[in-house]
Amino acid sequence: MTISFSAAVPVALTIAGSDSGGGAGIQADLRTFAFHQVHGTSALTCITAQNTLGVTRVDALPPEAVIAQITAVIEDIGVQAAKTGMLLNQGIITAVANQIAHQPDLMRNLVVDPVMVSRTGAQLIDDDAVTALRQQLIPLARILTPNRYEAQMLSGLEITTLNEMQAAAEKIVRLGAKAVLVKGGGMTGEWRGVDVWFDGERLEVLRTETVDTRDTHGTGCTLSAAIAANLARGEDLFAAVQQAKQYVTTALHYALRIGQGQGPVGHFFPLFTNAD
């Protein structure tokens, strides 16, 4: 039996890397889109060999191949929102930024997850790529979602307290993004998991419960993808962020204890028999 839907299905695009372990990157983004009843499209930027223990190899795609994927999606399907994740190098960042700047569909609801530094503080891309991200892509974003260490790099401020998170958010917005969500997952003590929102006028401290689990792989990708999915569904930006944070928190409650290292969050938790 074929079932057809009369209402148009929202579409979102993820421009990011592939995680062979299935916990982050394109794989996490597409699962997150599906949870939100949004059709997910993708443009791969790099292929990683990784599992719950770490990354053993990364291969970048040519910038032309990345742009060809984006063009194929836009010309036929169209999108209501897009997100970027791991872009890996200066060439890919520049090509993606140029493509987005000439595509109103991509710019309208662009979520930039500036994958530059891991939650543990290890820099993931070189300085030229960081410069390209800062100067070319961030000014196009409707919202930017840096973690603690990325926010430090972008703001030039040391971040150890809530006040410093707020000050960093205010400085980062000056880079051109319409809003920023400084994520507190890498913070310690009472500020762990506390995020700061700033859109140039409104400064908010966003708190959700802290979930005690070591299986947190892919939380950053998942959050930015959930924001993009909510924007594709027509939510306003602040509501999209709040709903995305709640989704990630619930998914952490159902994190997957797989592999020998850090497992992923449970993107598809409603399918679990013990889900609420």
Image (tube, rainbow, N blue to C red):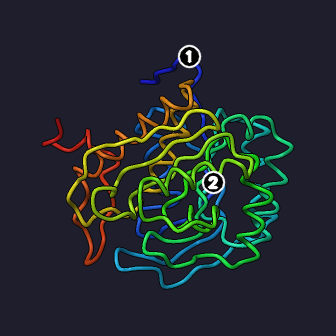
> Which quadrant: the N terminus?
top left
**Is label 1 in a helix, a strand or a loop?**
loop
- Marks 2 and 1, how far apart in space? 27 Å
The label number, if any, that marks residue 7 in the structure image:
1
> Which quadrant: the C terminus?
top left
The answer to whether residue 209 shows anywhere in this view is yes
Between residue 9 and residue 101, name the one nearer to us: 101
| Amino acid identity at mark 1 | Ala
Q: Say left or right for 94 vs 120.
A: right
Tell me the residue at 54%/65% (across/down).
18
The answer to whether residue 42 shows anywhere in this view is no
Tell me the residue at 62%/41% (across/down).
179
Tell me the residue at 63%/78% (across/down).
59
The relative height of residue 150 versus residue 73 in the rendered view (above or below) is: below
Q: Position of residue 188 (x, y in %)?
A: 32, 65
The label nearer to you, 2 versus 1, is 2
Asked if marks 2 and 1 touch (Cβ < 8 Å), the reply is: no
Q: Say left or right for 82 vs 236.
A: right
Between residue 11 and residue 215, name the one nearer to us: 215
- Residue labelled with disc 2: 84
Between residue 32 and residue 242, name the one nearer to us: 242
**Is label 2 in a helix, a strand or a loop?**
strand
Seen as rendered, the residue at the extreme front is 163
> Would you call the spot at circle 1 few (<14 residues within 10 Å), some (14-19), or many (20 or more)?
few
The relative height of residue 165 versus residue 105 in the rendered view (above or below) is: below
| Amino acid identity at mark 2 | Thr
Tell me the residue at 48%/75% (across/down).
121
Between residue 22 and residue 76, name the one nearer to us: 22
Q: Position of residue 189 (x, y in %)?
A: 28, 62
**Residue 94 position by quadrant:** bottom right
Seen as rendered, the residue at the extreme left is 274
Q: Say left or right for 265 vs 141.
A: left
